[in-house]
Every structure is written in structure tokens, then in C-alpha cells.
Amino acid sequence: MLEDIGTQKWIDASNATLARLQNPPGEATKLEVAVELKSDTGSSYFSLVIDDDGARLEPGSTSGSRVGIVIDRQLAVEINQGTKSVAEVIENGGIKIKGNAGSLADSADVLSRLAKSLSTILA
């Protein structure tokens, strides 16, 4: 299903996993990151939203995001497969950050907690 990244099927499967996560009590969080997946046939869009209701992916392009990332679909597949790391892709210019990059950096602890939670339930 890795080649389905960004499709509604992939978003639904990802949201089923994300629904198993719970926000720690008293943790008020609001983060929305718009994602553009580029390929030879065009772009597809979705957003990662983390708020008081939890974490989820929403299909389509959103104008409410203060920050967005642009990544080639094949690189996204390679990151998902573990053949490339996010750090490696950023270092080689494979991920472009649009908008307020500071808001993404300010949310590093939120994203880190999400990654830890996901690694626990996916193990």
C-alpha cells in the first residue's frame, strides 16, 4: 500500500492507526501541516492535523495551514519503506518547507511525541 500514499485509501488506513493514539491529559495542541506530494502526473494534497481531538489526516488542500511541506511521492514512499530517512531527504533538498517554518520547529516536541506513540502502536 506504500504506492497509495496520499490517496483516500491511504488516508483512511492512516487515520485508523492515528485514532488509536490519545492526547495526554491537559495537553492543548494545535498543529496543521499541509502536504503536497509531487509526481510526474501532478500533485496530490492532504494535511496532518493535531489538535485537542487527536491526530488525523485530512484529504485535499487547506488554506488554513501556516506551514506546508512539498515532497516527491517516490521520496515519501522511500521514507515509509525505511530506505531513506527524513533527515537525509531534507539534507539533499528533497523536502521543501513553505510558509512559517518556525511554527513547524516550535512544534518539534508535539511531532516527537506523535512519532513515539506511533512507533509504540506499530511495533
Image (spheres, rainbow, N blue to C red):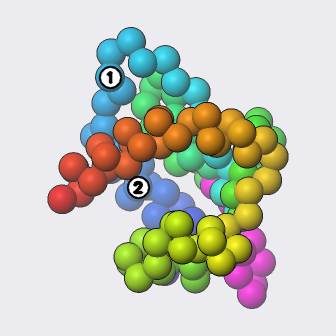
For the residues carrying marks 1 and 2, which lies nearer the camera in this image? 1
Whether residue 5 is visible here, answered yes or no, is no
- Which residue is farthest bottom? 40
Q: Main secondary structure of the magenta part?
A: strand
For residue 45, above or below residue 84? above
Q: Earlier in the sequence, mark 1 or mark 2?
A: 2
Residue 107 falls in which quadrant of the image?
top right
Magenta-drawn segment? 38-46
Residue type, label 2: Ser
- Name the residue rendered at 73%, 45% in the picture: 101
Determine whether, in the image, residue 110 is placed left or right of residue 121.
Answer: right
User: At which x and y percent is residue 16?
Assistant: 34, 49
Q: Which mark is residue 14?
A: 2
Query: Circle 1 is placed at which residue position?
Result: 24
- Residue at disc 2, secondary structure: helix
Q: Confirm whether the magenta stretch covers residue 121.
A: no
User: At which x and y percent is residue 11?
Assistant: 49, 57
Density class for disc 1 (Cα within 10 Å; few <14, some 14-19, many ≥20) is few
Which one is nearer the viewer's eye here, 64 or 9?
64
Density class for disc 2 (Cα within 10 Å; few <14, some 14-19, many ≥20) is some
Residue 67 falls in which quadrant of the image?
top right
- Residue at disc 1, secondary structure: loop
Quadrant holding the C terminus: bottom left
